[in-house]
């Protein structure tokens, strides 16, 4: 099965039927999205947090209470169509499930947040290799020492994803990814992980470590796991997120989010 | 008094002391903002409405309950620093006041929304005349037949502002204003008002009519009065907006919102 060539609807059906895989490299050209769902009482704080932190939290769509699909997942079900979900109660991860129907509540508001997997197609087309794809791993993600702008009761650190990039292609990846502001856009940091408060690139907080070549520089992008880090810190009674790296594959095309 | 050269803080102090004027042309180079404040219970619907309708409702800042100032109005007071306010109860306009302290409630959330006055400086610098400035009027604004994307209990029509532009400068105003997406950006409509459901340009729904020259085309931009039209239709128990054309003058520079 060439997962890069599947349609979003076909991929969602596979995940709905129980397949569990990180989605990097799936459905090339189609936009992937982070999920974070919180109770209606916490939805304003969440949306305001996203509005104030657009780089890690670009909102692609919002499903209001009772909605389980919408234009980004036509005919789908947000509770089943991702490969895996993380469930939080009072900020603690209490479960990872492949079907969230049992934990879903009628008052949950589901936010779909842009994902950097979206611009990986454009990087590949430019001849830039993606280490986690080459190495068959989930992308490495790290909590940083950089704080997000808080909103109401919600606060937390910036989370970043990392891709090692050859020194002579760093300028290209900046230029290419800057054209996709709705899916994290240009890197937030190029080089020294310590300046972001990351002590060990081999010990990511989410996802898998990847090997970094001698001529490669670690390049960091704002990451849509940031809302989950805020949930862990701010402890709403319930939250359901995607399992990191296991995204919603939407019916939007990457080119819908291309500027310039 | 050359109002174009005042600082934002000086202008806000004049309005706080009771001066009432439309703010077009004031504090050239400083960003102006629309105000809409709604009770906390309605704030999620409002913010989601803005997120779904970014062209008329670009959010520049949000003051949470209890906050009356912030980085956009340092040392100011959102309840007093605009020239005039419109007060709505259950969607009906019940008062226009120059000081909103008597009607303000502790649970109000104040949204500051981008205003097209911001790009007028750039148009003037390009040698494009602004009819309402030349004619000493408030900008004309119209309800249209175009519907906004609803959110929760909030729905309403798109409101537009209109500037007559000489035929040979229409392309220039599109190009220039497109560079300011956070303050409504490029026009939504150029030409025939009837196609927007506007029957009579001489009878604007807000602001003043302006004379249109024989070689001029009416050009329409999405307008930050749109949230007030949604309030009128959707009837939250209380809302406080700016009086149309009587904006908050912020401490942000127009250039902060310039892209490209």
Image (cartoon, coloured by chain):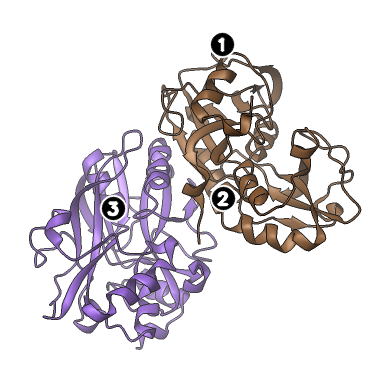
Chain colours: A brown, B purple
Q: Is residue A20 above or below residue B29?
A: above
Say if labels 1 and 3 share a chain: no
Residue A195, image x, y percentages:
83, 56
User: Which residue carries the number 3 mark?
Assistant: B226
Identify whether A141 is placed above or below B212.
Answer: above
Give the number of callouts. Answer: 3
The answer to whether residue B90 of the structure is visible from this angle is no
Callout 2 secondary element: loop
Pinpoint residue B21: horizontal percent, then vertical percent: 27, 73
- Among the 4 quarters of the image, the one containing residue B165: bottom left
Same chain letter for marks 1 and 2: yes
- Residue at the disc numbered 1: A102
What is the x, y in percent for residue B68?
Answer: 47, 56
Looking at the image, is mark 1 or mark 2 earlier in the sequence?
A: 2
Q: Nearer the viewer, mark 1 or mark 3?
A: 1
Residue B194 vertical position relative to residue B229 in the rendered view, above or below? below
Question: From the viewer's perspective, is the residue at label 2 or at label 3 nearer?
Answer: 2
Distance Cα–Cα, label 1 vs label 2 = 31 Å
Q: Residue at x 33, y 61 (%)?
A: B99
- Regarding residue B45, the answer to whether it shows in the image is yes
Q: Please rate how many residues cluster around mark 2, counting C-alpha atoms within 10 Å: few if below 14, some from 14 to 19, many from 20.
A: some
Q: Give the residue displayed 18% in from the left and 59% down from the top.
A: B142
Q: In what element is the residue under mark 3? A: helix
């Amino acid at each position: 099965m060439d997962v890069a060539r599947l349609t979003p609807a076909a991929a969602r059906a596979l995940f709905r039927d129980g397949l569990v895989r990180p989605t990097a490299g799936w459905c090339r050209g189609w936009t992937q999205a982070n999920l974070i769902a919180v109770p209606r009482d916490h939805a304003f704080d969440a949306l305001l947090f996203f509005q104030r932190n657009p780089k890690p939290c670009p909102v692609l769509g919002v499903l209001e209470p009772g909605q389980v699909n919408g234009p980004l997942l036509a005919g789908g079900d947000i509770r089943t169509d991702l490969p895996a979900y993380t469930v939080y109660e009072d900020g603690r991860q209490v479960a990872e499930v492949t079907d969230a129907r049992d934990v879903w509540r009628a008052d949950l508001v589901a936010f779909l947040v842009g994902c950097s997997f979206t611009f990986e197609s454009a990087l590949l087309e430019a001849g830039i290799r993606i280490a986690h794809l080459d190495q068959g791993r989930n992308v490495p993600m790290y909590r940083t020492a950089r704080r997000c702008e808080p909103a109401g009761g919600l606060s937390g650190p910036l989370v970043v994803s990392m891709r090692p990039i050859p020194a002579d292609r760093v300028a290209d990846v900046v230029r290419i990814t800057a054209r996709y502001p709705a899916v994290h856009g240009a890197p937030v940091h190029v080089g020294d992980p310590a300046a972001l408060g990351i002590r060990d690139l081999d010990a990511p907080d989410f996802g898998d470590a990847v090997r970094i070549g001698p001529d490669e520089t670690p390049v960091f992008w704002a990451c849509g796991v940031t809302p989950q880090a805020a949930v862990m810190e701010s402890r709403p009674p319930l939250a359901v997120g995607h399992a990191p790296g296991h995204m919603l594959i939407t019916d939007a095309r990457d080119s819908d989010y291309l500027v310039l």
